[in-house]
Amino acid sequence: MKKPFVTAKNAIFTAFLFIFAITFRAAIAQEEPEPEFNTHQTVAEKEFNAGEVIIHHVLDDHIWHLWDGHGTLFLPIIVYSSEKGLDVFSSHHFYDEHHTIVEYNGYKLEHNHILLAESNKAVLDLSITKNVAMLFINATILILVFSAVGRAYKRNTGKAPKGLQSFIEPIIVFVRDEVVKPNISHHHEKFLPYLLTLFFFILFGNLLGLLPGAGNLTGNIAVTLVLAVFTFLITNFNGNKAYWSHILWTPGVPLPLRLVILPVEILGIFTKPISLTIRLFVAITAGHIVLLTLISLTFIFQSAAVGFGTSIVIVFINLIELLVAGIQAYVFTLFTALYIGMATEQHDHH
């Protein structure tokens, strides 16, 4: 029997892409031709500012600047305030032909924060920023890859894996056998989908962030914080009686010492997600800063020799960054599995 062309998975994925495309289309529908992405100074007059370039790449933004001239993608602005209600427009309206920041429709942009122009009051900003766009791209790639792998498993049941399946399967087996099983002894299958999603989301985000012009998704502390909060909730909601008894009333410890241990244990509940947040954020951001600093040396010294030398170093640093991308995904998933394992482990007291 021939399989239907439209399946539930295909319909969901098509709807996701349609909504994403409509969001961008609504924001750029009324745009005029894109202005030059230059300041009042000419390129010759403007002094190269390495710090500005590095910070612009590392931080989130309402525009996505890919290259000089017309290589700027103006992202959708979605804001809500009690005074003006919901507004949707393009970030293009915040810039004039000289790329000077201007007010638009009662809003102004200050240090990448949108405020009401008259009262300087902050608004609820739900805009599609550069990192949010990268989040959509990362999620789309994950859906495409694992939908293809899932279909391949169905087609090749009982056969050796082929193509993309043969590349992804060893990674899945490694995460399951070397990360999840050793740290979550009881009912590890329950947590395997989350841990695999976590690993590949971070891995793909790290790798995409190394592409020229890409956003710094996993180097954004808001993203790493959300991932850490998910781990925090899953760990503590699945914690058993033994886990909570060791935290709130450690067995086998004298009463005076328990009063000292209790605040330390409670504090430890919150330091675990904090450490996950900071570790990934710092590692990825530091790598981007190092690479951009080396690239900036060519423009600072304006020397072809320096450019050639730094290009060789950058190649090796990029190889290290590829390794770091995998290591950080592994470490985040490993510690998550360890925390879940500690919360679900059965303790025997004699």
Image (cartoon, grey):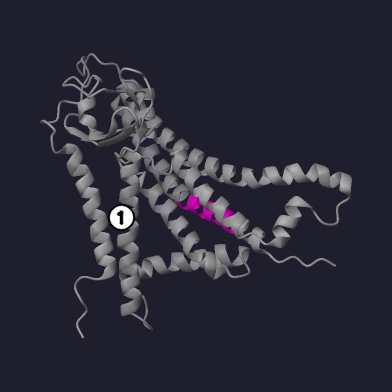
Q: Camera-side residue: 281 or 314? A: 281
Q: What is the span of residues highlighted in magenta in the rendered image?
A: 326-337
Q: In the depicted view, which residue is nearer to us: 259 or 145?
A: 259
| Residue 144 on image: x %, y % | 30, 61
The residue drawn where x is 82% and y is 56% is: 251
Q: The residue under label 1 is which amino acid type? A: Thr
Compared with 38, 197 (above or below) is below
> Quarter holding the N terminus?
bottom left
Q: Is residue 231 left or right of residue 320?
A: right
- Specify the quadrant of the image occupied by residue 345: bottom right
Indicate the position of residue 105 as horizontal and vertical percent values: 22, 24
Local crowd at mark 1 within 10 Å, few (<14), some, or many (≥20)?
some
- Image spot of residue 168 (x, y percent): 39, 65
The residue sitting at 23% across, 60% down in the picture is 14
Q: Magenta region, mostly helix, strand or loop?
A: helix
Q: Is residue 244 magenta?
A: no
The residue at which mark 1 appears reads as 140
* Residue 328 counted in the magenta span: yes
Q: Quadrant of the C terminus?
A: bottom right
Q: Nearer the viewer, residue 88 or 243?
A: 88
